[in-house]
Image (spheres, rainbow, N blue to C red):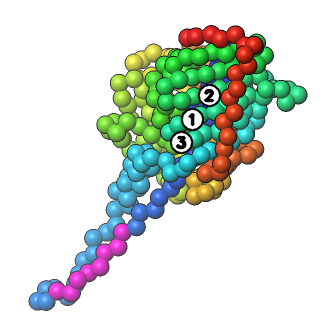
């Protein structure tokens, strides 16, 4: 079950794929001039600059939502474990991340509750509870992220540190962006026509193989002004390799959610 919980961490924390596209329009109105040349030259629209502004806004603007709910079928394969489960994710923005994993016969195996500074895991198959800090979650996922970073990854909002320099590469049908901080290198690929996130990659900036996750996003649907990717393929390489396919069957934003998390008095408690 511990291996499945590790898979759960990957499912919940790098499985998102949605963003809101914002259209930026500019207009130029020529003012009448006296004693000037009758030919008024209009400055051409710089489409590259506009796209850069749109993508920079997308990367650095906080996501506009209050709650999130998702139910996904997950097929995973790794040297430690393989199989298929159903994953439920509920989130209250900036406060709570709630995850439940259900196996065959609709039997819930684990439930996870993440707050700004804590991680709680109920292992129902073993009758135990693990209580730890957010630092332990960083160890599980091998990502040195804060709660806000995990939140953005779940909903699929691509973000990079504000101080990171964005490097753009314009292709015929796509736009690629890369950036880096001290620990992580970020790679994103967006479709050029609607700025849908098609691929993202997180890689160690230190030359190690501990962080190397490649995520592909497909099956976009517009939900409450948010473009949500319902089909995702995830390939994690390095020290803990894994392949994962996610197929979201249900998802919504800004609907009332509950976060049940009752710990049985008969369960043993572990601290990390």
Determine the CA span between mark 3 and mark 2.
13 Å
Q: Pinpoint residue 112: horizontal percent, then vertical percent.
A: 65, 26
Say whether residue 126 is left or right of residue 57.
right
The one of 177 and 144 positioned closer to us in this rendering: 144
Q: Of the residues under marks 3 and 2, which one precedes in the sequence?
A: 3
Q: Secondary structure at mark 1?
A: strand
Q: Quadrant of the N terminus?
A: top right
Disc 3 is placed on an element classified as: loop
Label 2 near label 1: C-beta < 8 Å?
Answer: yes
Q: Residue furthest front?
A: 265
Report how far apart the C-alphas of labels 1 and 3 lie in the structure.
7 Å
Q: Is residue 47 visible?
A: yes
| Mark before the other along the chain sequence, 1 or 2 | 1
Q: Which mark is residue 96?
A: 1
Residue labelled with disc 2: 113
Residue 215 % position (x, y): 58, 34
Total labels: the figure holds 3
């Amino acid at each position: 079950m511990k291996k499945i919980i590790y898979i759960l961490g990957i499912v919940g924390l790098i499985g998102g794929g949605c963003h809101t596209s914002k259209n930026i329009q500019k207009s130029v109105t020529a003012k009448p001039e006296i004693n000037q040349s009758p030919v008024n030259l209009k400055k051409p629209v710089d489409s590259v600059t506009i796209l850069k502004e749109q993508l920079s806004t997308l990367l650095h603007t906080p996501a506009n939502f209050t709650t999130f709910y998702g139910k996904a079928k997950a097929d995973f394969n790794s040297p430690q474990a393989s199989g298929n489960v159903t994953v439920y994710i509920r989130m209250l923005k900036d406060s709570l991340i709630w995850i439940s994993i259900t196996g065959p016969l609709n039997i819930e195996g684990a439930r996870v509750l993440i707050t700004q500074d804590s991680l709680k895991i109920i292992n129902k198959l073993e009758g135990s509870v693990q209580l730890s800090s957010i630092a332990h979650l960083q160890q599980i996922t091998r990502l040195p992220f804060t709660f806000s970073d995990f939140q953005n990854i779940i909903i699929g909002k691509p973000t990079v540190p504000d101080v990171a320099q964005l490097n753009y590469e314009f292709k015929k049908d796509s736009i690629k962006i890369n950036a880096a901080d001290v620990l992580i290198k970020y790679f994103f690929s967006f479709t050029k026509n609607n700025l849908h996130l098609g691929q993202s990659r997180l890689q160690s900036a230190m030359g190690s193989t501990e962080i190397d996750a490649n995520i592909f996003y497909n099956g976009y649907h517009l939900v409450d002004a948010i473009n949500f990717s319902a089909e995702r393929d995830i390939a994690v390489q390095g020290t803990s390799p894994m392949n994962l396919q996610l197929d979201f069957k249900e998802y919504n934003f800004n609907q009332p959610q509950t976060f049940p998390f009752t710990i049985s008095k008969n369960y043993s408690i572990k601290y990390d």
